Image: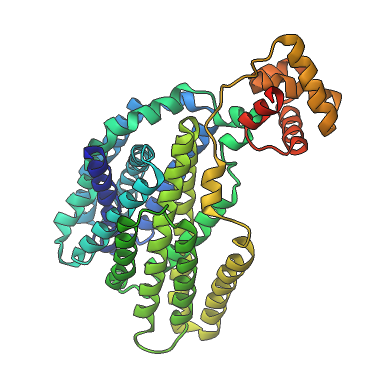
């Protein structure tokens, strides 16, 4: 129970940091260099993407303890430089200090995600829902926070999140650091790791574009319009999740999010004085629901395979950040078009609506978050236990039944004996991509998705 409370509190602190950043800290940047905010958000996203790529291709290079102290160092450096830069309005100092803070937060986001990935799916859903309710409740009062206090909290809250979850996250971080590269074990066991180009990650990016747009559209002197009313659907969903014993309804919440986001884009095209407020509220509510889904899905995917957990989670959060940057740019563009060209503004809004509705009708038609989570399996070290003579005969029988080629039979036999990508590549004297192609063909011809199903074919 204590681990659950610590992780929920840590996630709420991280979310609140984002609110303070947008409502208290970033508006002060506009006096000196308005693009410092966008550069810092980009720095955070790029840092997460880099962590995800390194964890995918060379996880041994990620030293958890070293990265912890590097994150603390970045935040301390920002704490020294940011107040002075704000006081004198130095553009370079603001950009560097904000980027330091952003890079430091990137590793802390991963740590909190790894801590939460140890929960079962329903428990993770409750954790995220409660954290979002706390976040939106606190955000409603962020306007009353003095600038100095807001800057201090902006720098301190991530450190509090790190302190609360470090011990809980260590087992997952060490498993990623000490294990084989996901890009390698996913070749012989394709279901163990989501490809970097998975539709899940594309979906996360696209929906976050709407969030970035809602942050900048209609802003007044760099301050986003209030989205306090978004707490209503968030709180309702949180209560329903906490009271229900059912699995987290990721797909249902995504559909509700699509409706709210599209309604928000329609509202922004209206000429009524309240249109910007209505638009931001609807967009924020839709994106809050989807961000809950994103956190839960990435946490659940990470929990399904601890050796690929860090890679999948960091990559997913990195792409959501890049989506925010793109959306914020579109929001700034829309602000300029409102006054200069109503036709241009309508073109931007129409394009956004078309993309979202099109993706909802076509892209999500055959996609399910729940199925994606269930489709990820742990790395399986099980091997066929049949004696060598029986083993070869059984494998040949399977190959004849399913039409495997002689080379595919060789690969099938090595997979059944638990051989990894490097062994198969060396034994057959072929490239990595050739091994990947052979494994893909074997799985397709056998009509299986997991390593255990392959073992079952031999043993049964």
Q: Is residue 91 above or below residue 30?
A: above
Give the camera-side residue of 40 and 217. 217
Give the camera-side residue of 345 and 9. 9
Q: How is the image coloured?
A: rainbow
Q: Which residue corresponds to the image point at 68% horizontal and 14% vertical from the top-left?
A: 386
Estimate the x, y position of residue 418 in percent, counting from the top left: 63, 19
Q: Is residue 55 above or below residue 418?
A: below
Quadrant location of residue 162? Answer: top left
Q: Is residue 296 above or below residue 386?
A: below
Give the camera-side residue of 120 and 199. 120
Q: Can the viewer see residue 288 in this picture?
A: yes
Q: Which residue corresponds to the image point at 26% horizontal and 55% vertical from the top-left?
A: 16
Relative horizontal placement of residue 345, taking residue 190 as reference (left or right): left
Q: Can the viewer see residue 314 in this picture?
A: no
Count all numbered tags in the image, as a single digit.
Answer: 0
Q: Is residue 132 above or below residue 74?
A: below
Estimate the x, y position of residue 262 in percent, counting from the top left: 49, 74
Estimate the x, y position of residue 7 in percent, counting from the top left: 27, 42
Q: Which residue corresponds to the image point at 34% horizontal and 69% vertical from the top-left?
A: 233
Quadrant location of residue 428? Answer: top right
Estimate the x, y position of residue 409 in percent, counting from the top left: 80, 23
- The N terminus is located in which quarter? top left
- The C terminus is located in which quarter? top right
Instruction: Specify the farthest residue to the bottom.
Output: 272
Q: Which residue corresponds to the image point at 49% horizontal and 32% vertical from the top-left?
A: 55
């Amino acid at each position: 129970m204590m681990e659950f409370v610590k992780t929920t509190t840590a996630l709420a602190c991280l979310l609140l940091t984002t609110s303070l950043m947008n409502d208290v800290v970033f508006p002060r940047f506009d006096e000196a260099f308005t693009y410092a905010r966008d550069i810092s958000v980009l720095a955070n996203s790029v840092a997460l993407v880099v962590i995800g790529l390194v964890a995918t291709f060379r996880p041994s290079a990620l030293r958890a303890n070293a990265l912890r102290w590097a994150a603390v160092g970045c935040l301390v450096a920002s704490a020294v430089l940011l107040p002075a830069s704000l006081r004198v309005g130095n553009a370079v100092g603001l950009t560097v200090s904000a980027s330091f803070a952003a890079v430091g937060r990137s590793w802390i986001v991963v740590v909190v995600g790894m801590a939460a990935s140890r929960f079962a799916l329903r428990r993770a859903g409750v954790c995220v829902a409660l954290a979002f309710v706390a976040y939106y409740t606190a955000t409603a009062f962020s306007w009353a926070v003095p600038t100095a206090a807001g800057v201090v909290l902006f720098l301190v809250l991530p450190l509090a999140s790190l302190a609360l979850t470090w011990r809980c996250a260590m087992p997952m971080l060490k498993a990623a650091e000490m294990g084989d590269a996901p890009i390698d074990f996913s070749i012989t066991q394709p279901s163990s790791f989501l490809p970097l180009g998975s539709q899940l990650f594309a979906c996360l990016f696209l929906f976050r574009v709407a969030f970035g747009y809602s942050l900048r559209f209609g802003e007044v002197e760099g301050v986003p319009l209030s989205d306090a009313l978004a707490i209503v659907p968030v709180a309702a969903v949180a209560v329903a999740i906490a009271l229900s014993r059912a699995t987290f309804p990721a797909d249902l919440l995504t559909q509700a999010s699509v409706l709210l986001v599209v309604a928000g884009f329609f509202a922004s095209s209206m000429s009524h004085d309240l249109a910007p407020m209505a638009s931001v509220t609807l967009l924020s509510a839709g994106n809050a629901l989807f961000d809950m889904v994103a956190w839960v899905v990435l946490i659940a995917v990470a929990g399904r395979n601890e050796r690929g957990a860090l890679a999948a989670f960091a990559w997913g959060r990195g792409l959501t950040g890049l989506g925010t940057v793109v959306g914020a740019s579109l929001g700034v563009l829309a602000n300029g078009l409102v006054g200069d060209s109503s036709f241009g503004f309508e073109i931007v809004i129409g394009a956004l609506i078309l993309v979202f509705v099109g993706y909802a009708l076509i892209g999500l038609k055959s996609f399910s978050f729940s199925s994606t989570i269930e489709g990820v399996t742990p790395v399986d070290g099980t091997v066929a236990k049949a004696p060598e003579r029986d083993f070869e005969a059984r494998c040949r029988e399977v190959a004849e039944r399913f039409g495997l080629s002689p080379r595919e039979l060789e690969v099938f036999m090595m997979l059944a004996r638990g051989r990894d990508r490097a062994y198969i590549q060396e034994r057959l004297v072929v490239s990595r991509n050739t091994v990947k192609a052979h494994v893909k063909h074997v799985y397709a011809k056998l009509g299986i998705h997991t390593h255990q199903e392959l073992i079952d074919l031999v043993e049964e």
